[in-house]
Image (cartoon, helix red, strand yellow):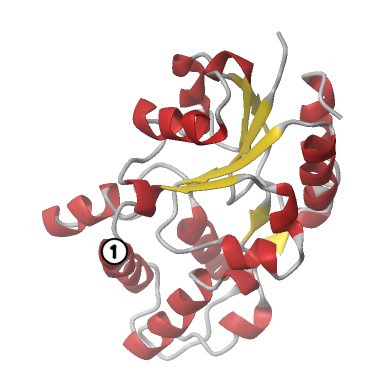
Amino acid sequence: MTISAVLFDFSGTLFRLEQDESWLTELTNHDGEPLDIEAQAELMRRMTAPVGQVVELDAEHVHAWHNRDRDPGLHRKVYLEVLKKSGVPHADQAEALYNRLITPSQWTPYPDTEAALKAASEAGLKVGVLSNIAFDIRPAFTARGWDAYVDEFVLSFEVGAIKPELEIFRKAVQALGVPATETLMVGDSEEADGGARALGCEFALVDPLPTVDRPDALLTALRTHGVA
């Protein structure tokens, strides 16, 4: 297969919301006690899980959960509820943590993110970032000059579709002007990102490990598919 375009997922693929002690040291539970290390780690997992409902929710919040990446209002609503049910009962603390979640500058790139984007672009491939997300992630790229390597950003809240729905993959390949059968999707979720296969795309799975533990998975994925 000839690969003419690469689509990269964002969270857990190109960037990761890393646990930052400065965010969490002031968080307290219902008893006013600081959250322990295990609780902090679980909190970060729940804030970034690509699929699967992470806490029990009522019907109103279940609807918001399933549509969170289509609508920023629903995203905020359900994540504040997730934080509340995950041991952060104080509204001001939950708001502060949520605001960090939706601030692109707070996300950490993987060590080979720049190299992978640059390699694909300089190889003459079209490059897209395709994300289930409810906020604009472009500033994370423009701040580093990496937007020069990205032809298109296809974000769920802007196009009204979410992975693994075929519509969002279709919009992405159309935006790049490349057939699906010549497109490689790179992502950390077999369920969400792997849905690209149904449209005819190739798929490469990467593990959403902490950034320090995953130095070159993106470059490896590209090389495995004859890119870079």
Residue ID at (61%, 63%): 17
Classify 26 as above or below 36. Answer: below
> What residue is at 49 percent from the left and 63 percent from the top?
136
In percent of width and height, residue 88 lies at 39, 78
Q: Along the horizontal axis of the image, is 55 left or right of 120?
A: left
Question: Left of 15 or right of it: where is 26?
Answer: left
Return the residue found at the far front.
177
Does residue 18 appear in this view?
no
Q: Nearer the viewer, residue 19 or 142?
A: 142
The quarter of the picture where the N terminus appears is: top right
Q: Could you tell me residue 65's position as x and y percent?
A: 28, 53
* In the depicted structure, whether residue 173 falls above or below residue 131: above
The residue carrying mark 1 is 78
Callout 1: helix, strand or loop? helix
Left or right? Give the position of 190 relative to 204: left
Q: Amino acid at mark 1?
A: Val
The correct choice, above or below, for 179 with respect to 106 in the image is: above
In the picture, which quadrant includes the C terminus? top right
- Furthest-top residue in view? 1
Neighbour tally class for label 1: few under 14, some 14-19, many 20 plus, Cα within 10 Å: many
**Residue at coordinates 55% horizontally, 61% vertically from top-left?**
137
Q: Residue at x 82, y 19 (%)?
A: 226
Residue 176, image quadrant: top right
